[in-house]
């Protein structure tokens, strides 16, 4: 009997392309190849889909120079990947897609929509959960409806920044005192996020965020500890939450460089938090995941104030799986190895169309 074929998608057109490649390498290493056959498909930043020959090519980036093009057929009767090499085409039946894609066109419901059309099981959240969780505006609307404490924010459109930025600056200054945080609504891994201490920095932050998205949030600054919680489940399985992890950033805040390229940034699991903050975080993480119709996995981020108040920050439906990523680290602290975690995610994805 042939082994089930898993197509691992990585790379992508978002600003998180490099993080996706790093995550994918770690996921691929943990998939049991005695049990599954792997088909590795990288997506360049220009949007070209290419077959990667092996894990080494993913790690060193040489997959981007491959010659075999790849495409997932949307035909639900086919359930296959089309591999094209010159004038030759091969159909490869697949049983599951593991979309290790972060950000635009990967974590926002678009690839999930293609896989739903093709009726191919996949790991992770569906179209709705992916879309609303990727868009911080809509996530905040849902959290607000649930009565969950979160940072106040002012929405800004790119067209407003480009049209009359002085009017935008005045509107924000009338609402908030400095410092404030500026965030693209649809970017992850802290891409395009900045902290503004004054008007000039706010202007620079708005212009930078506008390069990443047409929708921008300017948030009040929350003084507190940055913590994260991992969730797993959905469908036939109850949603469970991990313990809590704390970020100790080697920077003013946990930006992209501090996350992935500053060795002094640290994360710790099960920190001692004031009051009943730990249980509040775990309960709130599950509540938010279920509210967005989550399935599979997500990482939910919070702040904890000195008095123990928990403030929701954001939810990530395809969290990083790099060597330093919090999602696998949190489950590791509960005795679940990366290999077992990947296996659970695969099994859960395989059950997708029976469970929903």
Image (tube, rainbow, N blue to C red):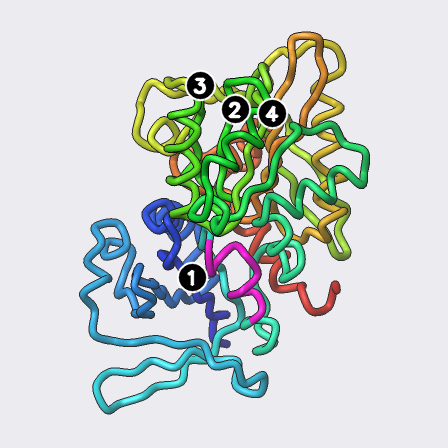
Nearer-the-camera pick, 205 or 95: 205
Image position, residue 310 (x, y; %): 70, 21
Mark 1 falls on what kind of element? strand
Mark 4 falls on what kind of element? helix
Discs 2, 4 touching: Cβ within 8 Å: no
Image position, residue 77 (x, y; %): 57, 87
Tell me the residue at 42%/49% (across/down): 27
Discs 2, 1 touching: Cβ within 8 Å: no
Q: Nearer the viewer, mark 2 or mark 4?
A: 4
Mark 2 falls on what kind of element? strand
Whether residue 108 is in magenta: the answer is: yes
In three-dimensional space, the C-alpha distance between marks 1 and 4, rounded to whole angstroms, equals 48 Å
Whether residue 82 is in magenta: the answer is: no
What residue would you read off at disc 2? 180
User: Can you say whether 109 is above or below 84 in the image?
Assistant: above
Mark 3 falls on what kind of element? loop
Q: Nearer the viewer, mark 1 or mark 3?
A: 3
Q: Give residue 221's quadrant in the image.
A: top right
Q: Earlier in the sequence, mark 2 or mark 1?
A: 1
Q: Which of the labelled discs sits on residue 8, or is there none?
A: 1
Q: Which of the labelled discs sits on residue 197, or is there none?
A: 3
User: Can you say whether 60 is above or below 49 in the image?
Assistant: above
In three-dimensional space, the C-alpha distance between marks 2 and 4, rounded to whole angstroms, equals 12 Å
Q: Which stretch appears magenta?
A: 104-113
In three-dimensional space, the C-alpha distance between marks 3 and 4, rounded to whole angstroms, equals 15 Å
Tell me the residue at 61%/32% (across/down): 313
Residues packed near mark 3 inside 10 Å, few (<14), some (14 to 19) or many (20 plus): few
Nearer-the-camera pick, 174 or 274: 174
What residue would you read off at disc 4? 174
Tell me the residue at 37%/17% (across/down): 250
In three-dimensional space, the C-alpha distance between marks 1 and 3, rounded to whole angstroms, equals 42 Å
């Amino acid at each position: 009997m042939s082994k089930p074929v898993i197509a691992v998608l990585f790379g992508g057109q978002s600003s998180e392309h490099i993080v996706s490649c790093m995550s994918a390498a770690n996921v691929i290493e943990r998939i049991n190849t005695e049990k599954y056959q792997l088909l590795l498909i990288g997506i360049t930043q220009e949007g070209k889909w290419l077959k990667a020959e092996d894990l080494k090519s993913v790690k060193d980036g040489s997959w981007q120079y491959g010659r075999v093009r790849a495409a997932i057929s949307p035909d639900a009767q086919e359930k296959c990947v089309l591999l094209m090499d010159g004038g030759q085409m091969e159909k490869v039946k697949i049983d599951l897609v593991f979309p290790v894609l972060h950000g635009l066109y990967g974590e926002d419901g678009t690839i999930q929509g293609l896989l739903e059309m093709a009726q191919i099981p996949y790991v992770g959240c569906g179209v709705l959960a992916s879309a609303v969780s990727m868009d911080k505006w809509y996530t905040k609307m849902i959290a607000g409806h649930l009565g969950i404490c979160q940072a106040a924010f002012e929405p800004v459109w790119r067209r407003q920044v480009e049209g009359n930025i002085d009017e935008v600056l005045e509107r924000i200054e009338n609402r908030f005192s400095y410092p404030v945080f500026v965030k693209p609504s649809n970017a992850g891994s802290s891409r395009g996020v900045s902290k503004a201490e004054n008007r000039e920095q706010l202007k620079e932050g708005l212009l930078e965020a506008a390069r990443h998205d047409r929708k921008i949030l300017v948030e009040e600054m929350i003084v507190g500890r940055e913590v994260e919680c991992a969730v797993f489940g959905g469908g036939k399985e109850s949603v469970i939450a991990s313990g809590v992890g704390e970020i100790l950033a080697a920077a003013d805040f946990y930006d992209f460089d501090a996350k992935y390229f500053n060795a002094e940034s640290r994360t710790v699991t099960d920190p001692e938090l004031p009051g009943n903050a730990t249980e509040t975080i775990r309960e709130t993480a599950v509540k938010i995941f279920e509210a967005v119709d989550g399935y599979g996995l997500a990482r939910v981020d919070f702040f904890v104030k000195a008095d123990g108040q928990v403030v929701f920050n954001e939810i990530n439906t395809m969290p990083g799986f790099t060597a330093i990523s919090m999602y696998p680290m949190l489950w590791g602290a509960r005795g679940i190895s990366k290999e077992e975690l990947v296996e659970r995610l695969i099994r859960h994805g395989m059950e997708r169309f029976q469970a929903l």
